[in-house]
Image (cartoon, rainbow, N blue to C red):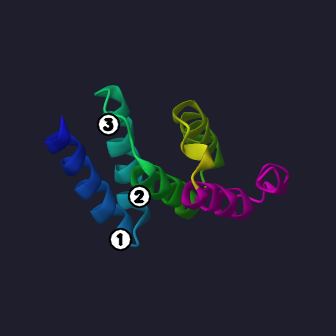
Amino acid sequence: MIQQRTCYINVIKECCSLKDCEVDCEALEMYNKMRESRIEPDSFIYINAIKACCILKDCEVGKLIHNHTIESGYDLNVFVSNALIDMYCKCKDTKNARRF
């Protein structure tokens, strides 16, 4: 399980380091595969998945990920919260951004 998590982390990290919308879509696909495999994301994964939503301006997927962070308790992590605020602001959803 640890090896799988490390593999997902490395792939998502690499996808998010490249400034390419197609690669950001791949990062979100990897995030979904990780969840389907029942591997619990950590703050690093959440931050990078949220970052991909920012770049793609995909607020709907970002809201789903936000719900996942609430379910897992990572919404209380200051770095995850900052990423969520950034995403909501870039999606022009100031109502949700202000909730933090």
x and y, in percent, of residue 27 in the image: 36, 52
Q: Which of these two is toward me, 41 or 17?
A: 41
Task: Identify the mark nearer the N-term, 2 or 3.
Answer: 2
Q: Position of residue 91 (x, y in %)?
A: 70, 58
Per the model, the C-alpha gap separating discs 2 and 3 is: 15 Å
Q: Quadrant of residue 4?
A: top left
- Mark 3 secondary-structure assignment: helix
* Residue kind at label 2, given as amino acid type: Asp
Q: Nearer the viewer, residue 35 or 100?
A: 100
Kind of residue at badge 1? Ser
Residue 56, percent from left and from top: 54, 58
Q: Is residue 30 shown in magenta?
A: no
Q: Which residue is mark 3?
A: 34
Amino acid type, residue under disc 3 in the picture:
Met
Q: Residue at x 54, y 35 (%)?
A: 68
Indicate which disc residue 85 carries: none
For label 1, the crowd category at 10 Å Cα-Cα, with few meaning under 14, some 14 to 19 and many 20 or more, is few
Q: Residues within 10 Å of mark 2 (few under 14, many from 20)?
A: many
Q: Which residues are magenta?
A: 78-100
Upstream in the sequence, badge 1 or badge 2? 1
Relative side of 22 to 98, left or right: left
Q: Which residue is mark 2?
A: 24
